[in-house]
Amino acid sequence: NLISTSLNSSDSLSYDLQAWQKGYLSQPHEYDYWIDDIEGEIPPELEGTLYRNGPGLLEINGQAFRHPFDGDGMISAIRFTNGRAHYCNRFVRTQGYVEEQKAGKILYRGVFGTQKPGGWLANFMDLRIKNIANTQVIYWAGKLLALWEAAQPYRLDPHTLETIGIDDLDGILEPGDGFAAHVRIDPNCEENGGEPCLVNFSIKPKLSTLITIYEISSQGKLLKKQVHSVPGFAFIHDFAITPNYCIFFQNPVKFNPIPYLLGFSGAGECIKFQPKDPTKIIVIPRNSGKIKYFETSSGFVFHHANAYEAQDRIIVDSICYESLPEVRPNDDYRETDFSRLDPGQLWRFSLDLTTGKVEKNRIESRCCEFPALHPNLMGRPYRYLYLGAAHSPQGNAPLQAILKLDLNTQQRQLWSAAPEGFVSEPVFVPRKNAIAEDDGWLLTVVYDSHHHRSDIVILDGRDLTQGAIARLHLKHHIPYGLHGTFVTP
Ligand code: 3ON
Ligand code: FE
């Protein structure tokens, strides 16, 4: 039976690898125009700007970066106003981007294996970091910030996307501090008089790992900062919050920095998944109380969907991979054999605060990533989750569809852009004055490999099955991106 399902799924691949690969071509140009090639209609009540971040350049002068996560951050802004939409993109003028563009060659090593030309000797002991500002873009306390977890944010002009410069959040961050790309906004922070507040962290991984948690008001004031040392090396990309806790997953990995130090590989390539070791879950109270540690069976988590408190439990929903494959020296990400890799799947972890036990249940086995939900339910019980997902219910494949999950009824809806389309992270925008949790729009960028261009697609959050409300055809493509946010005026 297993054999026949795997045969069936490879017989009917929903995508063509060459078509998928083209979405990883660089986009070196910067544009500024009103979008007028539109199918359907932009809802006139949709007012605001969708900001997206992701690698815009995947090479310099023909010297390819080793991994897309090493690509230079490029911000796209899609402004919706009066039923129209405007597109603009700009590279973040990071110090590294400016220097490398001027030099016309790679000057910095990347965390995910990009090396300077000239072999290992040219890279030996070069431990400088190129802040590529490529992972997320947020608007907080009047600042538009491009984030990359290993360094400080870059600030941009929210209208022109011009780079203003590196930003220490008015002194909150110290030189050398990172700032994670997965900022969480607590919509209703009790300690802040019921106002929203930004919660984020940074890590300094060594033999033990320092986790710093920041809570920042919408005026940009530091409300709280706590620093904790947790045992062991930790690579933590994302976290989850509830009104009373911050939750971190410490994936079972070992870090051997020698190949990095010697100039053979990037720091990220020196992380080795340990399938026999447990995943540790670190729960840090936001206000008072002691850190709690939990353990569950092995798995690798980049992204969390949401978390909430339920009596004496904390529920955490996360995208979990059974294993993280080793990158082999000659592997080329553009030749990814999806069938060799484990799919990301949605799991629900239930942490019992009294017994210290963890229950773990798979909610969705379809390959998925990039969870999104109603922003007011961050850290609260919630019903609807949206994700980028594979077209096929089984196996690992590129994201080609948007999946809606009703966590109460287990009902699912799927909107698919297969075979020629490849989706990015969906962003949920609630309709003004809406009551229902799913009353709003989902915005996503879809790479249309047939026309080699990207579309901005607007879906109705209540019903994905009715198809796109509007498909805005850009004049060009946006390389596969990472994260983004919607900012209402
Ligand atoms: O030594 C440490 C190890 C390490 C790897 C220290 C460190 C903090 C410098 C570090 C750096 C980590 C960085 C810079 C991580 C950046 C991650 C990034 C840019 C993206 C991660 C994306 C994750 C996922 C799951 C993306 C999925 C995408 C798709 C399914 C579709 O394309
Ligand atoms: Fe991420």
Image (cartoon, rainbow, N blue to C red):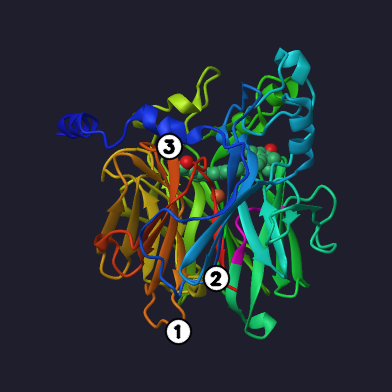
The residue drawn where x is 78% and y is 73% is: 221
Residue of label 3:
452
Residue at 68% x, 81% y is 192
Q: Which mark is residue 242?
A: 2
Q: Which residue is mark 1?
A: 433
In the image, residue 69 lies at what x, y percent? 59, 38
Estimate how packed mark 1 is, as few (under 14), some (14 to 19) or many (20 or more) residues with alpha carbons within 10 Å: few
Question: Who is closer to the viewer here, 165 or 356?
Answer: 165
Q: Please tell me whether residue 261 belongs to the stretch shown in magenta.
A: no
Q: Secondary structure at mark 1?
A: loop
Q: Residue at x 45, y 56 (%)?
A: 36
Crowd band around label 3 with a 10 angstrom C-alpha radius: few (<14), some (14–19), many (20+): some
Task: Identify residue type, mark 3.
Answer: His
Locate the N terminus by quadrant: top left
Q: Which stretch did the figure color magenta?
A: 179-184
Distance, label 1 to label 2, CA atoms, is 24 Å
Q: Nearer the viewer, residue 186 or 52?
A: 52
Q: Quadrant of the C terminus?
A: bottom right
Label 2, label 3: how many angstroms apart (C-alpha)? 41 Å
Establish if 187 lies above or below 404: below
Q: Which circle marks residue 289 in the picture?
A: none
